[in-house]
Structure formats: C-alpha cells, structure tokens
Amino acid sequence: MTFFTTSSKGQKPINSNKRFHYSWIILLVTFLALILAAGIRSTPGVLIIPFEHYFGWSRSAISFALAINLLLYGLCGPFAGALLELYGTRQTMAMALGLIAVGAALSSQMNATWHLMVLWGVVIGTGSGFFSPVLGTVVANRWFSKRRGLVIGIFSAAGSAGQLIFLPLFSKLLEIYTWQIVTWFIAYSAIAVMIIVCLLMRNHPRDIGLLPYGASQAASADHPEKNGSISVVITVFKQAVTNRDFWLLTGSFVVCGITSSGLIGTHFIPACADHGISEISAAGMLSISGIFNLLGAMAAGWLSDKFDNRWLLFWFYMLRGVTLAWLPFTLASDTYNLALFIVFYGLDWVATVPPTVRLTTDIFGKQSSIVFGWMMIFHQAGAALAAYSGGALHTLLGSYQLAFISGGVLCLLACGLVIKIRRI
C-alpha cells in the first residue's frame, strides 16, 4: 500500500511505501559522499613517497601541507554545521564537492611546496571539512528518530569503506601511471557525486511532507527554528567551554585525532616502506583494515544505543593504545604480527566516534551538532600536530618508533578522561 506526500516547498509529490522511508535514500547519498571524502583523506598516505621522489621535497615539508589539510578539516566543522542549517545539506554538500574537484584538478599542475599547501592544504582541506562527522550527525539527527546510533555508526564506517576502496586503487594507479592521474580521478569523482547529491539529496523530512524515521506526529509537531548564523556557533561554544564534560570529552577526542588520521592515516604507509614493505602492500594492508574498521564502527554504533558510552570509550582507547605501542615492534618482526595489528587497530579506528557523538547529544541536546563541530576542531588540531610532528621526528630520528609509542601512551590518558565524564 502506498501513500503520497506533498512538499511544503512545492516540490513534486513523492510516492512512498509504508515499509520504506526516504530517509534511507538520504542515508545512501550521504554515505556515498562520505566514502569519497574518506578516499580523499586517505590519499596523502600514498602520495608522500611519490612526492619525495618526483619533486625532491622533504617529508617534513610534505607533512606540513597535510597538517594544514587536517586542521582545516576540523576548523570547518562547527561552521559547516551552521551552513547546513542556513543553506541546507544539498547546497552545502554540492559546494564542498565543487571545491574538492577544483583543488584536485589544479593540483595536477603544481610544482612547488606552496602549491601543495594552498591546493591540498587549504582548498581540499576546506572542501573535505564539510564531510566531517558533523555532517553525519546533522543528517542522523534530522532524518532519524529511531536507529540513530546505528546510522551514526554507518556514517562512521564510511571512512573505512572509502579507505578500503580508494587506497588499493590509488596505489595501483601510482604503479601504472603517475600521481597526476590520481588527482584527476579525484576531481572527476567529486563531480559525479555532486550530481547525485543535487538530484537526490533533501534538506529535511518536512520538505517532502515526511516525519523523521521512527518519529510520531506528536513528537515532531514542534520544529525548532532554523538558526545557522555564525553568532550562534560562537555563542554555543562559549556555553560549552563552561561545561567540565566538554573538556573531558574533547580531550579524549584530541587523542583520537592524534592516533588515527594524524599518525596511522598519514604515516603508516611510509613507516612500512622504511621496513622494506612496498607501498602497494602497505596500502593493501591499510585498506584491509578498512573491513574491520567497517565492522567496528557499525558495532560501536549498535553498542552506543545499549551500553554506557563512557565505558565503551574507555575500552576502545585502551585497545588503541596497546596496538599503537605494539606497532613499531610488529613492523620490525614478521607479517603475522603486522596482520594482527591490522585486525585489532582496524576494529578500533573509528569506533570511538559513535559513543562520542552519543555522549555529546546526551549532554548538549539540540546544540550537539554545533558542539561536536567545535570538538572536531580540537580532534583535527591533534591530527595535524601528529601528522607534522610524525614527519618531523622521522626527518630528525630516521624512524617513527617514538611517534607511535607516544600515541599509545596518550590513549591511556584518554581512558582516564572519559571515565570522569558524568553519567547522564
């Protein structure tokens, strides 16, 4: 049996089956965009060594440009939340994909480190910043009343899927062609996804006469006013910084950034190359970890709906700390130990995101998407620091051992922080 709904904005009626909700289309489109963004964020790991060989640039100089990318990815977070409210998800996502396409296309012509800093650091960093977990949080909160934790877990798993798809693809393209082909591939892919977003994405369920998935009419009768001004972003931050739990949760999230995209996402492949493992093999292992990352993220989303998220974060950071401290020794030993690292680290890579989002939502309520955006700034500041310092330490010491072990120690600090968050 079907029913027809009419958009309040005059769009054509949408024919929907009672067993199917348009929110699942929104989920798929958002998931696709997040997969592409994750693929783009994984690109620097496979390009560090080609850039060293092709241009003769130092690893610390390349890492500095990538640190700018990671920092801007975080800085865009809270303002992305405001723009998503002000202009809508479809327009904001399309604009961000356009930025990525332009930055990737122009980067094929770069020949100086400042070109890398402007194009990969600023332009692509800004564009990809609109596909931070803030987007997934906004879409999940707006389109889903039930299954929200699972949906956030699925969006978190998009990073794993992007890594799984694009890392081996980019490595193969680099083996057969040149790094410029990778940049053109990214540009065309961004344009293709932008077209899909423009065709299928919608800003809010009420735009097409629907309620969020699982919501009752009574629960959704009172829609909050749209207020996406920059002043609101600043005001929410001023309120959040007076909350002790904000700093405890943010401190742990900084460690998440340091130990994920900052260290492993940027330096795992070069670290493997230092131990005689080819870039293609290292990228393959990192992409395989994406399978376990996918499982871990979805499991974390499911668990976040059922258990105390503080203790979930405690055990997730504990596992990550142990595996990171173990990594330098696995690189120097045999492939069996490295395979174990890929499994355990993969399961934990983004498992911290769903519990962090749920705790943020529980503590800050309707302002949670903006608060989480500010937390992403700190997360990516940690990632940027780790990306640059990892490269600088390698230039200074000739290895990543100190960087990886330090990351493991910081995870133990994060365990202590999350357990002090008050129980809601």
Image: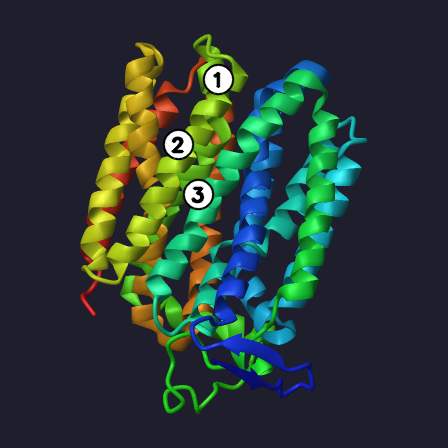
Residue 386 seen in this snapshot: no
The reply to whether residue 203 is in sight is: yes
The residues tagged by marks 2 and 1 sit, at their Cα atoms, a distance apart of 12 Å
Q: Which residue is mark 2?
A: 289
Extreme residue toward the front, this view: 1
Q: Along the horizontal axis of the image, is 83 left or right of 292?
A: right
Label 2, label 3: how many angstroms apart (C-alpha)?
22 Å
Viewer-proximal residue among 278 and 14: 14
Q: Are marks 1 and 3 in contact (CB under 8 Å)?
A: no
Q: On the rendered structure, is 277 left or right of 302?
A: right
Horizontally, residue 406 falls left or right of residue 24, namely left
User: Which amino acid type corresponds to the residue marked 3 in the rendered image?
Assistant: Gly
Quadrant of res 355: bottom left
Is disc 3 surrounded by few (<14), some (14 to 19) or many (20+) residues within 10 Å? many
Measured along the vertical axis of the image, is residue 20 above or below residue 130?
below
Disc 1 to disc 3, C-alpha distance: 28 Å
Name the residue that disc number 1 marks. Answer: 281
Q: Quadrant of the C terminus?
A: bottom left
* Residue 245 image position (x, y, % from top left): 28, 63
| Position above or below: 307 against 12 | above
* Residue at 69% from the left image edge and 31% from the top image edge: 182
Question: Which structural element holds mark 2?
Answer: helix
In the picture of the structure, the residue carrying the numbered disc 3 is: 382
Disc on the earlier residue, 2 or 1? 1
Image point (50%, 20%), residue name? 270
